[in-house]
Image (spheres, grey):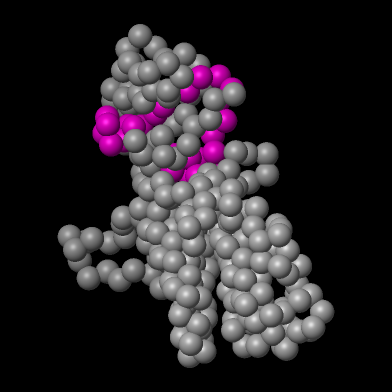
Amino acid sequence: MAALTELELRQMVRERGEFDSITVPPGTLITPAARQFLQERRITVNFGEPTSSSPSSPAGRPTPSAPPEGAPAPDGPPAAEQPAPSRADGPQAKPEQMTHLRGRLLVPKSHPRIRLRGKLDSLEAHILLAQMAAHKEGLAPLAQHLGEVLDYVRQMVRAEVMDEPLPPIQLFGLDDAQLRERSHHPKKYYGVSHTPPAVAHGEIMLWLNLVRTQVRETELAAVQAFWQEGELPERLDIIQALNRLSSAVWILMMQHLSEKGGTAGDLR
């Protein structure tokens, strides 16, 4: 079954300009983010083969259609979303309960994408605090690893805001598959079994665990922002990267425990 995504719609707008309706093959699945994009732009979706008067497009690609001659212009975006006032609009202030989703488009601050951005912001703050704690304890390699995690989270922020693809995760010299493998088998790679954090492990271990939990909460916010039950997820790159990011922090925890000479029992 074909799927229509937000990224495809944005590419079509860049290539062909704005349009008021689009024709997609019967049975096409419209992702949640694509549906939101269509609502914001007041674009009508037609299911069926494009007419002979429609612009040509590659096989399987949706076809934008021009509005019928004499048709009334759309009266603006849905009530829950509205364009921000421009300088030409005068001194009108942005409503305090609204914020920018992209460009001049305003959405409520409770919007799932805005909640995700708040979680990413909080995650950055916790990583910085853990990095500072590592510096204070003279753990330069760990601080450097946390810096890598921070840089990747900031790439994630940019990818989400700019609707750009997120580069594949690569941390500590490990790719996606290697991060997953090592996080699942710490005994094999670090000599310690899966060990819940405890006060006896020291402050830095607790900071790392806090970062790990923040990653997990951010992952849940990403799922809520980009997926609805029964639909294909949008931004699977971000969702999967957050899953691997929690694996990466777990690796740092097990590696730190190993370097302290800990085992599953003697530091708890």
Q: Which residue is at the front of the view, 120 or 263?
A: 263
Residue 175 spot, x, y in % from top left: 52, 51
Name the quadrant of the N terminus. Answer: top right
Q: Residue furthest top?
A: 52
Q: Is residue 228 visible?
A: yes
Q: Is residue 252 above or below residue 36?
A: below
Q: Which residue is at the front of the view, 121 or 141?
A: 141
**Residue 94 appears in which quarter of the rendering?**
bottom left
Residue drawn at the location 54% of the way across and 25% of the way down? 2
What's the magenta region?
12-38
Residue drawn at the location 31% of the way across and 55% of the way down? 103
Q: Is residue 78 above or below residue 107?
A: above
| Number of dots carrying numbers | 0
The answer to whether residue 36 is magenta is yes
Q: Is residue 77 visible?
A: no
Q: Residue furthest left?
A: 88
Residue 168 spot, x, y in % from top left: 46, 49
The answer to whether residue 169 is magenta is no
Q: Is residue 63 above or below residue 133?
A: above
Q: Residue furthest right?
A: 265
Name the quadrant of the C terminus. Answer: bottom right
Residue 42 spot, x, y in % from top left: 41, 39
246 left or right, relative to 89? right
Residue drawn at the location 48% of the way across and 70% of the way down? 145
